[in-house]
Amino acid sequence: MPLDRRHFLSSTAAASTLLAAPTIHAASKTKQYRTALIGTGWWGMNILREALAAGQTKVVALCDVDSDRLEISAEEVQDICGDQPRVYGDFREVFEKESVEIAIIATPDHWHALNALAAIEAGAHLFIEKPTGHTIGESQAILKASRDAQRTVQVGLHRRLGPHHVSGMKFLKEGHAGDIGKVQMYVHSRGGKEEPTKNSPPPENLDWEMYCGPAPLRPFNRRIHPGGFRHYLDFANGTLGDWGVHWLDQMMWWSGQQSPRIVYSTGGRNVQGEPVLNATEQTSDAPDCQIATYQFESFDAVWEHRKFGGAGPEKSSVGCYFYGSKGTFHMGWRDGWTFYPDDSNQSVVHQDSQLQEPDGHNLKLLWADFLQAIESGTRP
């Protein structure tokens, strides 16, 4: 059957409308889940705001190693809903002293496993930001613990529910791009050589030793906190462990969660320069350039990122390309998705993105899916 652009877009638009408002049974609206947020920074509060907007959240605890962030977030929660959560600097105390039904984990990656396992042991369902762990073994431990305890775990992969991502996957899985032989996933940004930044004593509001936690205790540096931890391999896995999780997940979604036969990678700090870490100063140490190749039975996939040379052609900064026997499909972020057919007699097919602004996410849909999974006993 030939591809009809108008028919496809009209049908997927209708589906997107349904997806934009996941059903939560009216009877369950009275249920208020006792919720704790571990990690009250920018993204953690984004998640909590969506949870509060859904109308089934009672915030009982906030936890952060930064007391200033705790104060700001507690005031915001009270302003939004009137809740007066208790505040903690140590997540272990949260689960010792509070009865928590849902735990939101939005800490730096190196803390995810310990936070998550404590929450599951305390009987809480879990909304955990990606990546689930700092290592594969940590993520496997969370999976086993949640299955053994029959707890629902939602990972912060909001692109799984974004309307244009859903319709784009439908397009691909229906075969409109043909047989896919290669997938290319990427994030490119601008940058240059990185000069070291002077270390300093931690600010009084920050428990730096607790921040480092299971990671090596290193000198404090303002480039790490607030908001820079992803560029330091003690705390995260660089761009691949940040943006890469979203776009590799698009490939895994399309492929039906296949496992690769072979994986290999190259990379380094070709432009930023060798990392520096001493008592006086430091730089980040995550790769500024990385290429990872995944060989599957029927296709190859490549991840690449660079933190330089970001001023490339259209649709080259973020997203993934699926190269098929009928043409090239681009799954983007703010630019929606686009199919470029090999047949010059066919028109380009495009669907715009539908995102929550100002951050361009779909957390509302993800949180609704999480609640549905808890209430139905199914996986999100």
Image (cartoon, helix red, strand yellow):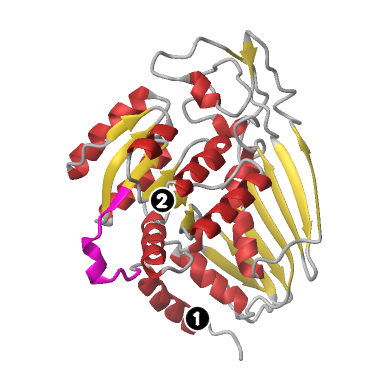
Considering only vertical position in the picture, is 264 above or below 212?
below
Q: Can residue 358 be seen in this view?
A: no
Dot 2: few (<14), some (14–19), or many (≥20) neighbours within 10 Å?
many
The image's mark for residue 8 is 1
Task: Tell me the amino acid under the disc marked 1.
Answer: Phe
The image's mark for residue 141 is none
| Residue 31 inside the magenta-drawn segment | yes
Give the camera-side residue of 249 and 368.
Answer: 368
Q: Please, what secondary structure does the residue beneath circle 1 have?
A: helix
Give the camera-side residue of 136 and 7.
Answer: 136
Write down the quadrant of residue 95 in the picture: top left
Range drawn in magenta: 22-34
Considering only vertical position in the picture, is 323 above or below 200?
below
The image's mark for residue 124 is 2
Q: How many labels does the image show?
A: 2
Q: Residue at x 54, y 65 (%)?
A: 337
Q: Where is residue 214 in the image (x, y as percent from the top left)?
A: 59, 29
Q: Where is residue 130 in the image (x, y as percent from the top left)?
A: 54, 48
